[in-house]
Amino acid sequence: MKTVKLTDKELATLKSAVWGQLQNINRDIRIANEAGKDTSFLDEMKRDLEEVFEALSFAN
């Protein structure tokens, strides 16, 4: 694993991008559920993005 240094602005940008993707995934899951489709792949992506967001929240 490689460590990178980010400015506060870069970190905020990454967190915003991940948050936006989480919102898109949530929308896609809702639409898929309404259509009766399998959401297992989307659920996995959501968990991964939530982990990334949490990790970024602890970044300095």
Image (cartoon, rainbow, N blue to C red):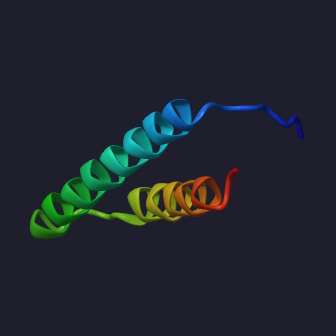
Across and down, in percent, residue 8 comes to 55, 38
The residue lying at 78 percent from left, 32 percent from top is 4
Q: Nearer the viewer, residue 16 or 37?
A: 16
The residue lying at 55 percent from left, 39 percent from top is 11
Residue 53 left/right relative to 1: left
Across and down, in percent, residue 14 comes to 49, 37
- Outermost residue to the front: 8
- Quarter of the image for residue 38 reads bottom left
Across and down, in percent, residue 29 comes to 25, 62
The residue lying at 35 percent from left, 54 percent from top is 22
In the depicted structure, whether residue 24 falls above or below residue 13: below
The residue lying at 44 percent from left, 34 percent from top is 13
- Quarter of the image for residue 55 reads bottom right
- Outermost residue to the left: 34
- Outermost residue to the right: 1
- Quarter of the image for residue 33 reads bottom left
**Location of the N terminus (image quadrant):** top right
Across and down, in percent, residue 5 comes to 75, 32
Residue 53 left/right relative to 6: left
Q: Nearer the viewer, residue 60 or 21?
A: 60
